[in-house]
Image (cartoon, coloured by chain):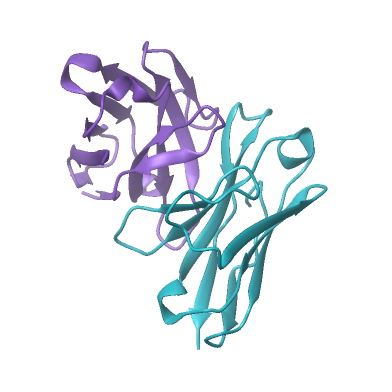
Amino acid sequence: QFVLTQPPSLSGAPGQRVTISCTGGSSNIGAGYGVHWYQHIPGSAPKLLLFTDTNRPSGVPDRFSGSKSGTSVSLAITGLQTEDEATYFCQSYDINLSGSVFGGGTKLTVL
Amino acid sequence: QVRLKTSGAGQVKPAGTLSLTCTVSGASITMNSWWTWVRQPPERGLEWIGEVSRDGNTNYNPSLKTRVTMSLDKSKSQFSLKLTSVTAADTAVYFCAGVTEANWLEPWGQGTLVTVSS
């Protein structure tokens, strides 16, 4: 059980657009805490993709974008590329835990 | 470029103590107010273990609080994790990371697999 809920897997063809959702509750996203997205390829360090819902660090392509609605946030990837195949997870702060909470991760397969 | 490198035993016996150290290079360890440990059991998602401040204050996950100790040594640019009374359920890839003011995690270490096994 994860405090933040993500679909476990998703797939898309090169060039397509996919969206990964992350749903929380009143003690995290609903309390106004930002959601951050990471890309993780096993064996390497997770890479920050978006911070505070919609912001891209320098160096992250604009194919990656974020949106927020209520207690849900989404990561959209347009123009899918084979190099995008990875696990994506969301993270926020939870006032009940007084620490970080994570989504279970979404494994993206580029067909 | 800031780098985090984890060191420590990759295998720990049941009931033993897991000890890991994360060394910060490329910048001062005081660049972040807080540093954190996160773990990922096999085929599962990430779990927050806790965090240590540059002044040595700590916050722990309540589910692990009785077994966790974190510390930070500015002189060595290192912060550490100790987890006592380990069981197979503690087998995981352990990551160290910096915590920004708005709570996103950056930078991250590569992660190190710790297996609890006799």
User: Do we see residue B116 in this rendering?
Assistant: no
Task: Name the one closer to the observer, A91 or B42.
Answer: A91
Task: Name the one closer to the observer, A27 or B64.
Answer: A27
User: Do we see residue A21 in this rendering?
Assistant: yes
- Image position, residue B46 (x, y; %): 48, 49
| Residue positioned most to the right | A70
Going by the image, does A10 lie left or right of A74? left
- Image position, residue A82 (x, y; %): 43, 81
Q: Is residue A96 above or below residue A17?
A: above
Tally of numbered tags: 0
Going by the image, does B73 lie left or right of B96? left
Residue visible at 21% across and 23% down in the picture: B77
- Image position, residue B112 (x, y; %): 26, 49
Task: Name the one closer to the observer, A60 or B13.
Answer: A60
Among the chains, which one is cyan? Answer: A
Going by the image, does A61 lie left or right of B107? right
Name which quarter of the figure residue B28 lies in. top left
Q: Colour of chain B?
A: purple
Residue visible at 57% across and 57% down in the picture: A104
Q: Is residue A71 above or below residue A75?
A: above
Residue visible at 66% across and 69% down in the picture: A19
Task: Name the one closer to the observer, A59 or A20.
Answer: A59
